[in-house]
Structure formats: structure tokens, C-alpha cells
Amino acid sequence: NTKDVPDYYQMGPGTLKIPNTLFKDNRKRMCDRLVAKNISRGAVMFFEGGRQEQQYDTDRDIEFQQESYFMWLFGVMEADFYGAIDVDNCESILFMPRLPDSYAVWMGELKTPEYFKKRYGVDRVNYTDEMVTILSQLRPSALLIMDGVNSDSKSHFEAPSFEGMDQFKIDTTTLYNEIAECRVRKSPGEMEIMRYVNEMSCDAHKEVMKMMRPGRMEYEGEATFKHYAYMKGGMRFVGYTCICASGENAAVLHYGHAGEPNDKRVNSGDMLLFDMGSEYAGYTADITVSFPANGRFTENQKFVYNTCLKANRAVQAAMRPGVSWPDMHRLAERTIVEEFIKEGVLINGTADEMTDAYMGAIFMPHGLGHLIGLDVHDVGGYVNAPPRIDEPGIKYLRTTRDLEEGMVITVEPGVYFGDALIEKAYANPEQAKFMNKEKIEQFRGMGGVRIEDGVAVTADGIELLSHNVPRTVEEIEEFMNRSN
Amino acid sequence: NTKDVPDYYQMGPGTLKIPNTLFKDNRKRMCDRLVAKNISRGAVMFFEGGRQEQQYDTDRDIEFQQESYFMWLFGVMEADFYGAIDVDNCESILFMPRLPDSYAVWMGELKTPEYFKKRYGVDRVNYTDEMVTILSQLRPSALLIMDGVNSDSKSHFEAPSFEGMDQFKIDTTTLYNEIAECRVRKSPGEMEIMRYVNEMSCDAHKEVMKMMRPGRMEYEGEATFKHYAYMKGGMRFVGYTCICASGENAAVLHYGHAGEPNDKRVNSGDMLLFDMGSEYAGYTADITVSFPANGRFTENQKFVYNTCLKANRAVQAAMRPGVSWPDMHRLAERTIVEEFIKEGVLINGTADEMTDAYMGAIFMPHGLGHLIGLDVHDVGGYVNAPPRIDEPGIKYLRTTRDLEEGMVITVEPGVYFGDALIEKAYANPEQAKFMNKEKIEQFRGMGGVRIEDGVAVTADGIELLSHNVPRTVEEIEEFMNRSN
Ligand SMILES: [Mn+2]
Ligand SMILES: [Mn+2]
């Protein structure tokens, strides 16, 4: 009896309800794409879900998170599933592991194929030990499988393999590009999730801002963020390692890793740069707030912050379908350079000359932003895209595509005074000549500022998903001092 | 200049300071053991630390946690190190990855060999690309490496491999058993950490008890536990997936996994079974509290709870060096059976007859407890130990050893009314004849109770590490109602 089996995902009351039709719709988008291109007719797409892994050689289970392609197609939360989709009619089959009865004592009541059929809204569910038989009955012209290199991460995708696979014709070349391309544009249902994770993550950031003060440890920001997102949003995981940087650490772009685990004490006068995003049903936010620990910007902090904010807003004002993302990166850099000229931080030249000398990448050494969805750096950035641009800063840009309606992308200009890059620029006469050392030295030690928003591209502009954090100097100071 | 480099690990103010000599002492214990046995003289022990891995094919870093053997020997928090120890003189070398200068922008100032030498207190630090040269200079009679199957988890340990390894004689058989045996008995320094993680985890459990009430979601317990342990204890990770079970879910021993992610609403009348432990410097606690959601035990709940507590305390009273752990398991089961006879839950026979019929394992289907340390199910349980006992319940016991001073082990009897096992017993005439169905049905649906302590074996008894949670019915009711 499957009457009480939910046909949706929801973690708790007040958290987002995600109908299983969202994933059915994703499967349909994929089938439609192949059918429209008239490729792989008669074939069956075949996918392996994530496996339950253990920590090194121990019996400790690593907390399972579904592999993103499998999640996108099936919405399955459990490990060790396989899935198949018939290209021609888009019929879907899930294959579930057959567990011994004894597992009920350890893992809970064993769920049936009927349970999962209702829960995930697929056409049928069989056990993995029936996979070869069932697939054979479909008489596929080929099995289309994921293989090869993820063009965003450069990591190799581990192709599925199973006993009896050799009796099928295997096509490893069709699937990857098509499915990555489908994931680039979010459906209305997916957009709902992106709104949700952004709103919850904004609220969590605000909770952190209320709590952080000089004397706190950076990691208390991480603890508070995770706690809020889980309590209020039902979000068990973050989408990436929390970056809670204070003072000089803000110039370290991926601060927070095991070697620098957010373990500095926050000092009065420090700027904080907190880059955190929580995930729900695998979809993640990625939001950075920068604010003064003591609730008041110094004049120097205000200048750097406003420069960054100006770049952020200039980009958002210019974004719409058809706009090139590298152009947006250049717009952000240009905005920073121009503000630096106005303030006399950069001297002895025009913005054009400084752009030619790559002055922007000294202060913003990373890409402007990246596609986001089930992966924090989402796939498809270099699928059907112009080649990577091999110049300072912009070479790290995670997509060179033109914007399209339905894309969700981060806008995250940053302005940093990192020792390594500034020293290198001082040593390069082509760059040093533009640099007002006296001014720049005043900013050394303040680390830097990043203002990162989650932004959806609409038919004629954008929707700001991370709208619910204080962003201007005035908003931040008011928020920090009101909540005191 | 390494003047300011700490020679200890400490996450923040008020958190435990762990001197690097703790790990030096571990290395010495290992060398002394080999020298005393006069084996592998002239050889060099060689270890590969944990690697930084990415989530599936994405570029998302999985949060790094050090491999436990490497942690035990070197205390290194960073990924991608190797280490060597000369058996004869116990001189230690760490090999660190040589990162390009450009990493400073992303990962923070690049640390030097001198930094790590001071930080980790080893005799020298070289880069991994110097490994073959340095190892050759030592002219080792053999490299002793970890290989083979972890006798606790049954997982395969991935042997280290590096280019140029083939020029050394490799010994894969000596190391594993010796080092696992060394990890079984905790040093005074390790015992300090075990006290710390137990005390912090107890405090976190109390914080959860203050907050949990009918209407809350189970996962709010997980969120609150993690938050407290991180804020107050600087503990970024838990040692295993949090189990926050309410009502019937308490009978599911590993509840909380991705398929059952602590997502039930807590009802009034539910017993809660919360099994959570946080870790610090890789060492973990493992503590279970069971309590009524509404702060008042029913008579049935009180009976089951007190039965479990009696088993827990009987074991702790009997524990001392030389005592066999299987005997302790049997003592716990026997205590439960005797209480069930007194209450008329089990009938028509003596405790002996019921023991012969394995009645205890119906209600306590797991092992009494396990060694704990850097792994929640710590190594060495079946090294130098009698064979596993192939009988219901006790077959899951994670060690058959006699207790020794310095062991840390969990004492976690449980009393459950799980549908699967009770139905199976009803269907078995050899067991059904002892079962008072009318009584047992009264307990169905209440799930169960587990009372899990962390316990150190001392010279003449035990030290209770998890002393700081309310344990008796009276203590729990008083605590739950005081904090309301
Ligand atoms: Mn980002
Ligand atoms: Mn345990």
C-alpha cells in the first residue's frame, strides 16, 4: 500500500516541498533534446548513482550525497541506485539494491520497489540484480553512458560498469555534452529551489552578522551559519567548505580548508569576508558577505567596499540574455580600475592603458562568477562555449558563454590586497609604474572584500536571488548596530 | 623564523591544547615495540597520509580529515603528506607537497619545511619530490608499509605507492598488526583528548535535551548538537553520522543515514534516542542518551529505561583489566533477560534456558560496545584476539579481547522492540514459548532505549568519561523540567 508514500521531497515543516515531477521534467528535457536532434533513437540512457563510501579503510560511512547528474535526472536521495531512460518514449526505470532482510534492524524498514516508484515517480523500479535482464528486454540500439572528462572541473567522470554490460553496444560520446547543456538552464521548478537556498542562506548570513564581533573566532561564524540553515531550512549540508576569513585572511580566496580552518580570532578593525552557502535536495547557494567586525567601516574599508559594490552592481545592471560573460568580467575589472584611478590608488595612466597592463587582475585575481545549481561550480561552463581566455584573472573564469534566460550564475567581484600579487606587481615595471605605493600600502593588511550574489538571468534582465542581505555601507552599519 | 609557529594543536581559546609530543610519543611506542621484538631492524616505516579528494567528478573539495594511522603517528592536519620513521632510532621525516607559488592566492601563505618541522615536531621535513632520494640515503633494509585488510572494518587498506618505490625492498606484513595493537591502549596524552571530546559531547547532548520537545523535528537535535560542539569545543566534525531517532525509529540502529535523515516530527509520548559524538584532532566521542520528549517517562518507558541502565551499570561495575569483553556482553544480555523475567515480559523458563535460546539478542541485537579513539569503531578489536563468536547479537561484538589498562571502550547496552526481530521470534517456537505476547505488545511502537557511555579502563577498574549527562530517570526528569 503506497497511499502514504510522499511523491515529493520535504525535510520538515516550513521547508520547501519539491515534487518528483521536477525530475521527471528534467528527464523529459533530456529526451526532447535528443529526439529533436534525431540522435540515438532506439537507445537507452544508463546512469549509475552515487555509492555509499567509507572513510579510508574504516567502517565509518561518509555521509552520502547523491551524484549530481543522477540527482538531476531522478531526485534519488539513497545510495547505490542505477537508472535508465528510454530515449524514444522517455520511460524511466530505477534499479535499487536488494538488501537482505537483516538490514531492517540497522537501516530501517526495507523499502519496496512500489515505494520508490511512488516516491520518485518513475515508470518502474526493479532490483539491480535484474538490471541486465530488464535492459536486454528493451533491446536498446545502444546504452548511452556518461564517460570522459568533466569540462568544468577537469576531473574524470567514472563510467558505470556492471556484470553483463559487454552484451550491449556502449556509446560513451553522446550523453555528457547534452546533459551538461540541459543543466545549464534551470526549469521553473529548479528556479524555486534556487530561490529557496538563496533566501535561507541569506537569512543564515544575517544570523552570523548579528553574532560576529571582535573577540569571536572565525569558526563561530561557520557554526552559526550551518546551525541556522539546518534548523530553519532543513539543510543538512553546505555546498562547499565555509570560508570565514577575517583581516588579512580575506585575501586568501579558498580560506577555510583543513590547513587554514577558520581558526583566527577576530580583531576589532578587521573586515570579515564570509563566503557560505547551504544546499537543499542537492541544490546549493553561494553567497559572500563582507562587513566590518565592529560594525563600523573605516574610510579605507568604505572605499574598498564601495569599489567592489560598484563593480557588482554595474555587472548586474548590464546582465541580460545575449551578453558575454567575459565582457561582464572585464566590466567588473574596469569598474575597479576606474575607482582606483579616481582615488589615486592607480596613477600615471588611463584606464585603457591599465587594462592593457592587466592591472585589474592584481586586485581581482579570480573569475567574476560561475554557473551554479546542483554543483557550486555547475557544469556546462565550457560546453558549447568559446575557449578559455588565457590572460591574468579572466583565465579563471568558469564560463565564456553568452548569458541565456534560465541560467543561474554568481556575480562575485572582489577587491583584495594580497601580498603575493602586489609584491609581484611591484617587481614588474610594466605594472609598478601605475601603482601609488603610498596609497596601496595603506590598504595592505586589510585583506579584501568580495560581494557575491546569486543571480538568475530572465528574459530581459535578471532576478537577484540573494536579495535579502544588507549590501550598502549604510545597510550594513544599520543592521550591525541595530542587532547589537 | 619559526618563533611564532605553534608546536601544538588548538582550535581556539578554551579548547584543548594538544602538544606535538603526543604524536612523537606514539611514534616512540611503535619503535619501542618493534625494537623490543627485535624485528625489522634497519628498516624504515613508511606511510601515506590522506589525500585531498573531490566530490565525484566535480571540483568541489570534500572536507579533508586525516587518515587515522597517519594522524596517530604525526598529528598532521593537512592533506597529501607522506611520513617515514626509522625503526632503529625513531627519527621521523615528513614529506610535504611542493605547491606552486600561485597557490598562495588561493590557499594562503605557503608554509615552509621549517614551519612544519616546528609545528609537528619531527626530525626533518622534505618535499615529496625529494622522497626517493632521502629514503635511499637511509639505506633501509626494507620499507615497512601498511597493506591488507583492516581486521575491524574488513575494508582494504590502500597501500602507499610512489614512483621509484620499486628500488626498495617492501615489507607489507609487519606493520599493520603492530600499529593497530599500539593504538588499542591510549597514552596519558590521548586520554586527555578522550576526556575532552566526551565532556564536550556530553555538554552538547545536554543542550539538545534542553531544546527538544514534542513538535520539534529530529534533525533539530543534530543541528543543535553540532552547533554547540563547534562553538564551545572547536569541533568541526562529528565522528559518525548523527542518530536522532524518535519513537519507533529508535529501534533502527543506524537511523539518520541518507535514506532516513532524521526527518520525523517528534510526538509527545515519544522516547528519543540520540547517538552523537564530536571529534577533536581526529579523536571522537560516541555517546547515546535516551529520554522522553515531553520530559516525563511513562511506566513502560521507565521499565525499559531502567532495564537498560541496570545492564549498563552492571557492566561498568564488573569492568577491570583481565575481564573478557564477550563476558561483559553476556552480562548485559543476562541483566536484561532477568529484568524481563521479573516484569513478566519473558515467562515459562529460567534465565539460563532463555540464554540458551538467545532471547537476549532479540531485544539487544548489537554488540555491547567497541574500542574507540581516532576511529569511532577503533582498530585492534580483532588483532591478537580470540575469534569472533558466531551467535546471535554477540557476533556483532567488535572485539573479543580481554580488557587492559588504557583501553577506551563504549558501554552501550540497548533494549529495543523492533518489529523485524520480534516477529521472527514469534515465528520460532523455541523462542516464542518464553514470550509474553500481551506484555510485549504493550512495548511495541516505543522503539527502544540505548545508554552509551565512553569508558576508560584503569589499573583497577574504570574511569567514566561521559559522566556529565543525566542518566537516572530522576536525573533526566529533573533536568528536562528544570530547563523548561
Ligand atoms: Mn562563488
Ligand atoms: Mn557506539
Image: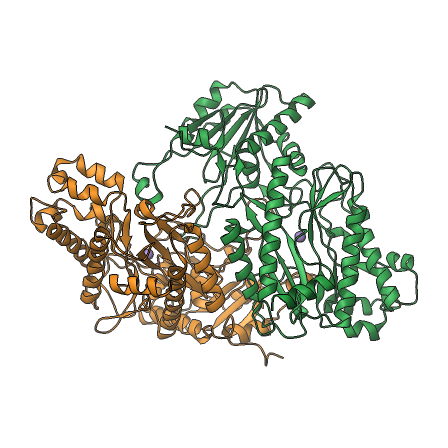
Chain colours: A green, B orange
Q: Position of residue B137 (x, y in %)?
A: 53, 68
- Left or right: B330 as drawn, with respect to B126: left
Decide if residue B282 is in sight here. no
| Quarter of the rendering containing residue A402 | top right
Against B114, residue B155 (above or below) is above
Left or right: B462 as drawn, with respect to A252? left
Instruction: List the single residue furthest toward the left.
Output: B349
Q: Position of residue B144 (x, y in %)?
A: 42, 61
Tally the marks. Answer: 0
Q: Quick one: A32 or A475, which is closer to the camera?
A: A475
Quadrant into which the C terminus of chain B falls: bottom left
Report the front residue among A382 and B217.
B217
Residue found at the very far right of the displayed protein: A349
For the N terminus of chain B, which image quadrant? bottom right
In the image, residue B423 lies at what x, y percent? 22, 37
| Image position of B28 with respect to A409: above or below | below
The picture places residue B107, in percent across and down from the top left corner, at 64, 62
In the rendered structure, the answer to whether residue A308 lies left or right of residue A124 reads: right
Q: Quadrant of residue A355?
A: bottom right
Q: Is residue B353 visible?
A: yes
Q: Out of B100 and B391, give the one closest to the viewer.
A: B391
Q: Residue drawn 75% across and 67% down?
A: A417
Q: Residue at x 48, y 20 (%)?
A: A136
